[in-house]
Image (tube, rainbow, N blue to C red):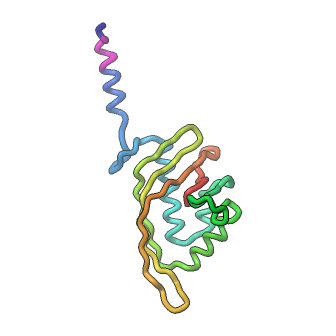
């Protein structure tokens, strides 16, 4: 069977149009860009230790089990502001950087896989201690109207 040349050209044209976001392996789509914008807004809010700005990005359905079976370390939307305020009260000079490695959007749900590099100082009763954490993380999202909101992973 011979495939018409216009079908081959159309397929090649479509493949050529699928572009990645610059300097990433992530497809350049409106949803992917929106998820990246939320992650970046979270980074900025965390860097300035702004609880209200973080909470503006979070869904009322937020729930995180911290990756454990122990329910005592679970955090829901209601508890999150207190956890953030407590965390922010103990750290100074924070700088966090994210590298998003993958985004998967499935209908009104999405996930962003990323690595982070956090540099900060922890206040103790006697001194401030410099710290640095590097790890991988997955943030889960759900679409709330036209906006993506974080539902887990902070």
Q: Residue at x 60, y 47 (%)?
A: 142
Dividing the picture into quarters, in which one does residue 75 lie?
bottom right
Determine the residue located farthest toward the right in the rendered image. 78
Instruction: Give the image location of residue 106, x and y in percent.
Output: 54, 38
What is the x, y in percent for residue 130? Answer: 43, 81
Q: Is residue 4 above or below residue 52?
A: above
- Please report the bounds of the magenta region as a residue range: 3-8
Give the camera-side residue of 20 and 82: 82
Classify 150 as above or below 128.
above
Give me the residue at 31% from left, 12% from top.
3
Count up the numbered dots.
0
Q: Main secondary structure of the magenta part?
A: helix
The residue at the far front in this view is: 69
Q: Residue at left 50%, top 56%?
A: 39
Residue at (52, 60) in percent of width and height: 41
Residue 49 placement: quadrant:
bottom right
Side (left or right) of 128 relative to 18: right
Counting from the top left corner in percent of width and height, residue 32 is at 47, 45
Q: Quadrant of the N terminus?
A: top left
- Above or below residue 5? Residue 90 is below
Residue found at the very far top of the displayed protein: 1
Q: Is residue 111 magenta?
A: no
Q: Is residue 5 magenta?
A: yes
Looking at the rendered image, the quarter that the C terminus falls into is bottom right
Residue 114 percent across, percent down from the top left: 44, 55
Q: Residue 67, relative to residue 81: is it above or below?
A: above
Which quadrant of the view contains residue 29?
Answer: top left
């Amino acid at each position: 069977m011979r495939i018409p040349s216009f079908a081959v050209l159309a397929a090649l044209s479509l493949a050529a149009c699928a572009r990645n976001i610059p300097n990433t392996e992530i497809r350049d789509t409106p949803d992917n860009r929106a998820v990246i914008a939320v992650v970046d807004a979270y980074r900025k809010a965390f860097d300035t230790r702004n609880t209200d700005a973080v909470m503006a990005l979070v869904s009322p359905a937020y729930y995180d089990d911290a990756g454990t079976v122990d329910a005592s370390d679970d955090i829901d939307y209601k508890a999150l502001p207190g956890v953030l305020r407590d965390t922010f009260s103990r750290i100074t000079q924070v700088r966090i950087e994210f590298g998003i490695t993958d985004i998967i959007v499935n209908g009104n749900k999405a996930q962003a896989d990323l690595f982070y590099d956090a540099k900060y100082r922890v206040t103790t009763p006697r001194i401030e201690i410099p710290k640095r954490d590097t790890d991988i993380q997955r943030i889960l999202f759900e679409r709330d109207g036209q906006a993506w909101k974080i539902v887990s992973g902070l």
